[in-house]
Image: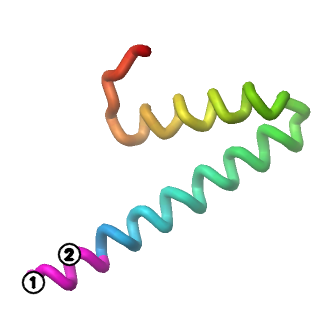
């Protein structure tokens, strides 16, 4: 696979992740979570999906 195809795949994966996180954010807001809590939850969810071991 050439570099352009790999770049396109990476961009598509980032786009898909952004859409998933936006849907999660919107659902949390609809359920009545405070905006700051939503941000924290979305960040934690992204860390889990990406496999981050960061425990800040």
Residue 2's tag is 1
Quadrant of the snapshot with the N terminus: bottom left
What residue is shown with label 2?
A: 6
What residue range appears in magenta? Answer: 1-8
Q: Is residue 8 above or below residue 22?
A: below
Expressed as whole percent of the image width and height from the top left, the position of residue 46 reads 48, 39
Q: Is residue 1 above or below residue 54?
A: below
- Residue 43 lies left or right of residue 1; in this view the side is right
Expressed as whole percent of the image width and height from the top left, the position of residue 50 reads 36, 41
- Residue 27 lies left or right of residue 5; in this view the side is right
Q: Residues within 10 Å of mark 2 (few under 14, many from 20)?
A: few
Q: Secondary structure at mark 2?
A: helix
Question: Pointers 1 and 2 in contact (CB under 8 A)?
Answer: yes
Q: Secondary structure at mark 1?
A: loop
The quarter holding residue 28 reads top right
Residue 40's tag is none
* Residue ID at (35%, 21%): 54
Q: CA distance from mark 1 to mark 2?
A: 6 Å
């Amino acid at each position: 696979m050439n570099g352009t195809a790999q770049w396109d795949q990476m961009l598509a994966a980032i786009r898909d992740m952004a859409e998933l996180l936006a849907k999660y954010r919107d659902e949390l807001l609809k359920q009545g979570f405070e905006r700051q809590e939503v941000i924290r939850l979305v960040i934690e969810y992204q860390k889990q999906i990406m496999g981050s071991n960061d425990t800040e």
